[in-house]
Amino acid sequence: MPDFEFDDHTRLGECLHNGKGLLLDLTDGGELHGLGQDWKARLNYVSAQAKDAECLKAVLVRPDGFVAWATESEPDSIEAEESIKSWFGNEV
């Protein structure tokens, strides 16, 4: 996963320092916010605008920095949750 710089000048890599996965929401809608709250024991949720994110709308990043799921369209919370369960287990 590229180390995007967010509008507040923090970097994506800083969000992975605690060994959790990352659910990155690059939309203004917050469709994924509930998932971020439900899975906060295993994931960091960040809703922000990133420089050079091009057409990405949301990304699920494993703790090792590899992309587990991404979308260029408006995020579907059901699809995102299926990916989260696949990578981080079924139990919240």
Image (cartoon, helix red, strand yellow):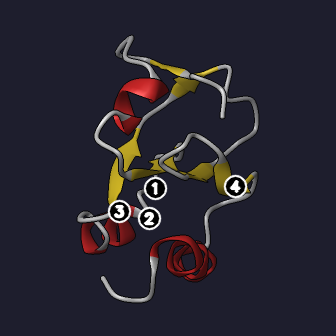
Q: Earlier in the sequence, mark 1 or mark 4?
A: 1
From this view, report whether residue 82 is shown above or below residue 18.
Answer: below
Tag shown at residue 29? 1
From this view, report whether residue 15 is shown above or below residue 34.
Answer: above
Tag shown at residue 33? 3
Q: CA distance from mark 2 to mark 4?
A: 12 Å
Which secondary structure, mark 3? helix
Front in this rendered view, residue 49 or 46: 46
Contact flag, marks 2 and 3 (Cβ < 8 Å): yes
Q: Earlier in the sequence, mark 4 or mark 3?
A: 3
Residues packed near mark 2 inside 10 Å, few (<14), some (14 to 19) or many (20 plus):
many
* Drawn side of residue 52 relative to residue 86, left or right: right
Residues packed near mark 4 inside 10 Å, few (<14), some (14 to 19) or many (20 plus):
some
- Amino acid type at circle 4 is Ala
Q: CA distance from mark 1 to mark 4?
A: 16 Å
Residue occupying the point 76% across, 51% down: 72
Residue occupying the point 76% across, 38% down: 55
Residue at image mark 2: 32
Q: CA distance from mark 1 to mark 3?
A: 9 Å
User: Where residue 89 sits: x, y (%)?
Assistant: 45, 81
1 vs 3, front mark: 3
Residue 4 sits in which quadrant?
Answer: top right
Residues packed near mark 1 inside 10 Å, few (<14), some (14 to 19) or many (20 plus):
few
Residues packed near mark 3 inside 10 Å, few (<14), some (14 to 19) or many (20 plus):
some
* Drawn side of residue 71 relative to residue 16, left or right: right
Residue at image mark 4: 70
From this view, report whether residue 47 is shown above or below residue 78.
Answer: above
Q: Quadrant of the N terminus?
A: top right
4 vs 3, front mark: 4
Contact flag, marks 1 and 3 (Cβ < 8 Å): no
2 vs 4, front mark: 4
